[in-house]
Image: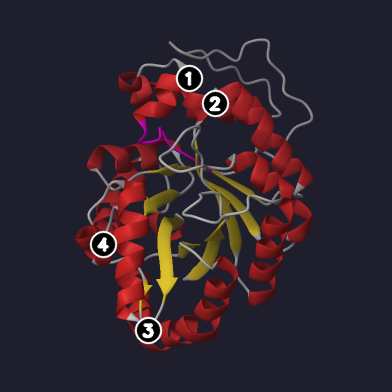
């Protein structure tokens, strides 16, 4: 299991939203040995939110050797043609480092401001994924569905990767979601605050049969867990404040629920929680520091990562 980083796109209080901050964060993550940088996507949210694709593009030259990922991007809300153009450019300018993780999104507010019915999101997602593949293909492939049609559309220049960036699908782990992953995706992205190691392991097990039916090899089918909110502190009061006053209100979730498996607290406890995900079959975890981003990722690599390595089952 390796570790990626979410770009600090959300303001929990004090985020400067400057290019210098993004660049310093990306360069520090690269120097520390993190494997990837990821950008989440919302148009509107409970807190100020910097545009994800724009932020990801801004750090291309400061992230050499790292994967770039959208975790997830919203092809329905943004429009699959517009998103294909944007992500295709990021892939080309990065030299083919992009993993395009997509999903319907869980915010009805994003759909409302885009003028799209929220209850159409699943049907539209299936078509949007096929639309992205058709638009990124160098062959003359046309997709025509109930919502989207690529006839007569050529988006050049093409992405750097021959068939376009791999498309992963985000799913919290429902059976319907995992069947969609097997049918349409090149990888599965789970959510760190909507799963546990046990639930994640069960999802991987369930995914085996649909993957085989789809002609895909389960043992080599990649996965990752995103939005793994992080704050390492040996002070219990600080950890409780981060959960109760910062994270829970922003996500509209209970602190007790978030406390169960998110790595918030002492280094040893954080390592135990993340090692459990490794043992459950996770290949990559995208960490998102709640505050003090630069200090937190340094503490993680210096104190938590060595403990994880000592705890994982070989």
Outermost residue, bottom side: 310
Of the two numbered discs 3 and 1 in the rendering, the one whose residue sits closer to the viewer: 3
Label 1 near label 2: C-beta < 8 Å?
Answer: yes
Q: Secondary structure at mark 1?
A: helix
Q: Earlier in the sequence, mark 3 or mark 1?
A: 1
Of the two numbered discs 2 and 3 in the rendering, the one whose residue sits closer to the viewer: 3
Which segment is the magenta one? Answer: 101-107
**What's the residue at 40%, 79% (across, down)?**
233
**What's the residue at 63%, 49% (across, down)?**
17
Reading the image, the residue beneath label 1 is: 114
Q: Badge 2: few (under 14), some or many (20 or more) residues near its Cα, within 10 Å?
A: some
Disc number for residue 234: 3
Q: CA distance from mark 3 to mark 1?
A: 43 Å
Q: CA distance from mark 4 to mark 3?
A: 23 Å
Residue 313: x, y in percent?
A: 34, 83
Up-down relation of residue 112 to residue 310 (above or below):
above
The quadrant of the rendering that contains the C terminus is bottom left
Label 1 near label 3: C-beta < 8 Å?
Answer: no
Q: Badge 3: few (under 14), some or many (20 or more) residues near its Cα, within 10 Å?
A: some
Label 2 near label 4: C-beta < 8 Å?
Answer: no
Of the two numbered discs 4 and 3 in the rendering, the one whose residue sits closer to the viewer: 3
Residue 302: x, y in percent?
A: 54, 85
**What's the residue at 60%, 25% (across, down)?**
134
Q: Earlier in the sequence, mark 2 or mark 1?
A: 2
Residue 204: x, y in percent?
A: 30, 56
Of the two numbered discs 2 and 1 in the rendering, the one whose residue sits closer to the viewer: 1
Q: Is residue 207 visible?
A: yes
Q: Earlier in the sequence, mark 2 or mark 3?
A: 2
Q: CA distance from mark 2 to mark 1?
A: 8 Å
Reading the image, the residue beneath label 4 is: 196
Q: Nearer the viewer, residue 204 or 212?
A: 204
Reading the image, the residue beneath label 2 is: 78
């Amino acid at each position: 299991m390796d570790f990626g980083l979410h770009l600090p796109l959300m303001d929990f209080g004090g985020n400067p939203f400057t290019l210098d901050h993004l660049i310093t964060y990306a360069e520090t993550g690269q120097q520390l040995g993190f494997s990837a940088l990821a950008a989440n996507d919302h148009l509107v949210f409970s807190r100020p939110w910097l545009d994800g694709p724009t932020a990801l593009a801004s750090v291309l030259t400061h992230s050499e050797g790292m994967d770039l990922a959208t975790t997830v991007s919203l092809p329905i809300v943004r429009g699959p043609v517009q998103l294909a153009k944007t992500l295709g450019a990021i892939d080309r300018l990065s030299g083919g480092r992009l993993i395009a993780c997509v999903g319907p999104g869980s915010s009805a507010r994003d759909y409302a401001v885009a003028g799209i019915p929220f209850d159409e999101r699943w049907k539209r997602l299936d078509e949007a994924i096929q639309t992205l593949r058709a638009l990124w293909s160098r062959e003359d492939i046309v997709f025509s569905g109930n919502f989207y049609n690529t006839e007569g559309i050529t988006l050049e220049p093409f992405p750097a990767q021959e068939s376009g960036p791999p498309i992963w699908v985000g799913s919290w782990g429902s059976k319907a979601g995992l069947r969609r992953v097997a049918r349409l995706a090149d990888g599965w992205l789970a959510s760190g605050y909507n799963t546990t190691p046990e639930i994640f392991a069960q999802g991987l097990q369930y995914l085996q049969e649909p993957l085989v039916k789809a002609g895909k090899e389960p043992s080599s089918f990649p996965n990752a867990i995103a939005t793994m909110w992080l704050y390492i502190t040996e002070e219990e009061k600080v950890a409780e404040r981060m959960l109760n006053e910062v994270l829970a209100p922003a996500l509209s979730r209970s602190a007790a629920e978030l406390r169960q498996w998110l790595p918030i607290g002492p280094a040893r406890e954080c390592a135990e929680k993340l090692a459990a995900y490794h043992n459950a079959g996770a290949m990559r975890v995208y960490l998102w520091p709640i505050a003090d981003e630069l200090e937190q990722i340094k503490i993680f690599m210096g104190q938590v990562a060595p403990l994880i390595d000592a705890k994982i089952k070989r």
